[in-house]
Amino acid sequence: MEAKTKISTEQDRQDLVITREFDLSVALLFKAFEDADLFEQWMGTKVLKLENKKHGSYAFETSQRGNVVFRANGTIHEFIRNEKITRTFEMENTPFPVQLEFLEFEKISEEKSKLTLHIVFKSIAFKNQLLQMPFAHGINMAHNRLEEIMKFLN
């Protein structure tokens, strides 16, 4: 089955662009990123903090058998409901430095929307290192869960 979430990048650039069209209104798509309970469901991670405002911050944590296996945090620099979120993203206890993320939410029709996520890395090497991990598969699976969960709220 072909992945619906697309990742594009150029070899000589330190950024990548992730796009996905959803069979959801832009308001429902945005809500999946704004509501901590919904975010936990589709991302499969615990939301420790989610301050949806300019200069707000967030923190996520994933545990298995009582051990923390992943923790991420960042600062929200721009938050415009149903339009965009600009934030930093840092994976704790990894060699990856902070990255900058631009999330844009676009209305295609009343029941269809598009997410564009532009990620800027400190270097090409860090971008390439992330792409060697099962990142593409994981984000596609998460987006599939997002769409399934949010369809029930429609």
Image (cartoon, rainbow, N blue to C red):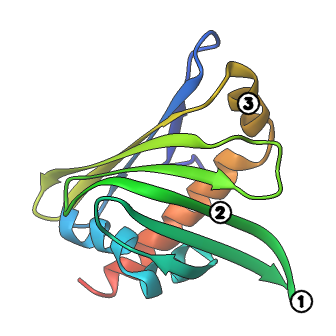
Please give left or right for residue 121 compared with residue 78 in the image. Answer: right
Callout 1: 10 Å neighbours few (<14), some, many (20+)? Answer: few
The three-letter amino acid code for the residue at tag 3 is: Phe
Residue ranking furthest to the front? 55
Q: Where is residue 120 shown, x and y percent of the image?
A: 52, 31
Q: Where is residue 107 shown, x and y percent of the image?
A: 16, 52
| Of the pair 128 and 112, the residue shown nearer to us | 128
Residue position marked by numbered label 1 in the rendering:
65
Are the residues tagged 2 and 3 within 8 Å (C-beta)?
no
Q: Where is residue 23 shown, x and y percent of the image?
A: 29, 63
Question: Nearer the N terminus, badge 2 or badge 1?
Answer: 1
Are the residues tagged 1 and 3 within 8 Å (C-beta)?
no
Residue position marked by numbered label 2 in the rendering:
72
User: Height in image: 65 above or below 94?
Assistant: below
Question: Nearer the N terminus, badge 2 or badge 3?
Answer: 2
Q: Mark 2 or mark 1: which is in front? A: 2
Disc 3 on helix, strand or loop? Answer: helix
Disc 1 on helix, strand or loop? Answer: loop
The three-letter amino acid code for the residue at tag 1 is: Arg
Please give left or right for residue 35 compared with residue 37 in the image. Answer: left
Q: Residue at x 21, y 58 (%)?
A: 112
Q: Residue at x 57, y 65 (%)?
A: 142
User: Height in image: 133 above or below 33?
Assistant: above
Between the C-alphas of marks 1 and 3, the distance is: 29 Å
Between the C-alphas of marks 2 and 3, the distance is: 16 Å
Callout 2: 10 Å neighbours few (<14), some, many (20+)? Answer: some
Between the C-alphas of marks 2 and 1, the distance is: 19 Å
Residue position marked by numbered label 3 in the rendering:
126
Residue ranking furthest to the top? 12
